[in-house]
Amino acid sequence: MADIIVKNAYVMTMDPDAGDLKNGTVVIEDGKITEIGEKTSESADTVIDAKHSVVMPGLVNTHTHAAMTLFRGYADDLQLADWLEGHIWPAEAKLTADDVYKGSLLACMEMIRSGTTSFADMYFYMDETAKAVEASGLRASLCHGLIELWNEEKGATDLKEGKRFVRAWQGAADGRIKTMYGPHAPNTCSDEFLAKVREEANRDGAGIHIHLLETEAELLAMKEKYGKCSVHLLEDIGFLGPDVLAAHCVWLSDGDIEILGKRGVNVSHNVISNMKLASGIAPVHKMLEKGVNVSLGTDGCASNNNLDLFEEMKTAALLHKVNTFNPIALPAQQVLQMGTINGAKALGTETGMLKVGMKADLIVVDMKKPHLTPCFDVPSHLVYSAKGSDVRTTIVNGKVLMDDYKVLTLDEQKVMEEAQKTAEELVARVNA
Ligand SMILES: O=c1[nH]cnc2c1ncn2[C@@H]1O[C@H](CO)[C@@H](O)[C@H]1O
Ligand SMILES: [Zn+2]
């Protein structure tokens, strides 16, 4: 007997060999997809009737700072340097482990509700984020942020904590948690420190998550300090590879794109954060042309201000159309690939597609809504009309986390109340 059957659904597999099924069934057993077809002869404990709904792979958020939900709307409409150094970092200095737990739980709740089934996170007190991931049922690739700032002692302390975290949580929560190293950025960490991080990551077989060329200020600072940009510096110290996840990648030259493509680096495109902080427009179409694996991220809630990847998909599609004066740029199907397959590849998880043998991370999107009526083309609706709040069921690793709009793994009212209280107390400490 199977564990879960999702029936009567429009099945959008994202599998290029299989295509979509207009009225299909997905069978799940032991955390994996065991059957996809028109009908099944199996029976299961849980049968989900997905009439008027689409079942698709869960979305993958490849760059966020989950606990920054606590700073949602806290410091808006500012320059990045002022935002980070004048507001966010002083506030983060007052963060406690418990704050990070409460903020991470809120983020997990929001992600389950909006159809995100896995995410990559870089922050502090990461044991707490890992505990929230464990409790929520989501999948995540987590790292402790290493901000050396040319201070040898801070670098050593951060790296030690990063290593402890990598080793403590690798493969935890039934394999749902992976760990990475998280050097913050090439303009906040020295070249020697970055080389050291690369060595440690090799030793532990862990990947690396980094911010890369988010702003023009980073590009100029790197040119002045090293006489070359961040990508060339990382290339010269042997840092780049298919286990690197680089967030933003806005200020890339054509040569940089060649290097990222050649090294198999995974890019997280954070279109809304880049627009809100006016960082610039990442050359996404050029990266895709050169075969770079471009996925989608929200960044933290202080620069977005939510974790809804449906918004991210729509905004990415629209921005790159107007930026290239080409309405054919980034069509719906390609944006969906970025949000699913490419994200799964970036995190190295066996997800991102509905295919027999893959891990069962999938969502059911309710299409019986005024803003989704009529429906001629499902991928187009998912990108241009649907919202995270249209997701009615979320399944990760073969476990139902939300069933017909009810989150089963966390107490929603309690999570919101505690996050609200925690955020208010934190801001009071910052202003004291
Ligand atoms: O867009 C961004 N650019 C640079 N840093 C960021 C951004 N968003 C969050 N952080 C910062 O990265 C650190 C994570 O360890 C945190 O200090 C967080 O505030
Ligand atoms: Zn970030």
Image: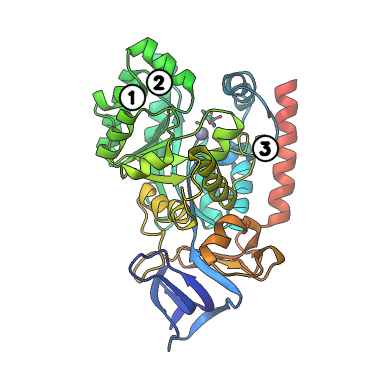
Q: In the image shown, does 75 or 379 lie closer to the viewer?
A: 379
Q: Residue at x 64, y 62 (%)?
A: 390
Quarter of the N terminus within the rendering:
bottom left
Give the Cα distance between marks 2 and 1: 7 Å
| Residue farthest top in this picture | 224
Residue 416 x/y as whole percent: 71, 49
Q: Most extreme residue toward the front, as rendered?
A: 325
With respect to residue 297, does 252 lie above or below?
above
Q: Residue 72 got which mark?
A: 3
Give the residue at mark 2.
189
Mark 2 near mark 1, Cβ–Cβ under 8 Å?
A: yes
- Mark 3 and mark 2: Cα distance apart in space: 27 Å
Query: Element at badge 1?
Result: helix
| Residue 378 seen anywhere in this rendered image of the structure | yes
Q: Earlier in the sequence, mark 2 or mark 1?
A: 2
Please tell me how crowded label 1 is: few (under 14), some (14-19), or many (20+) other residues with Cα within 10 Å: many
Q: Amino acid at mark 1?
A: Leu
Residue at (47% x, 56% y) in the render: 336
Q: Amino acid at mark 2?
A: Cys
Q: Quick one: SS at disc 3?
A: loop
The quadrant the C terminus occupies is top right
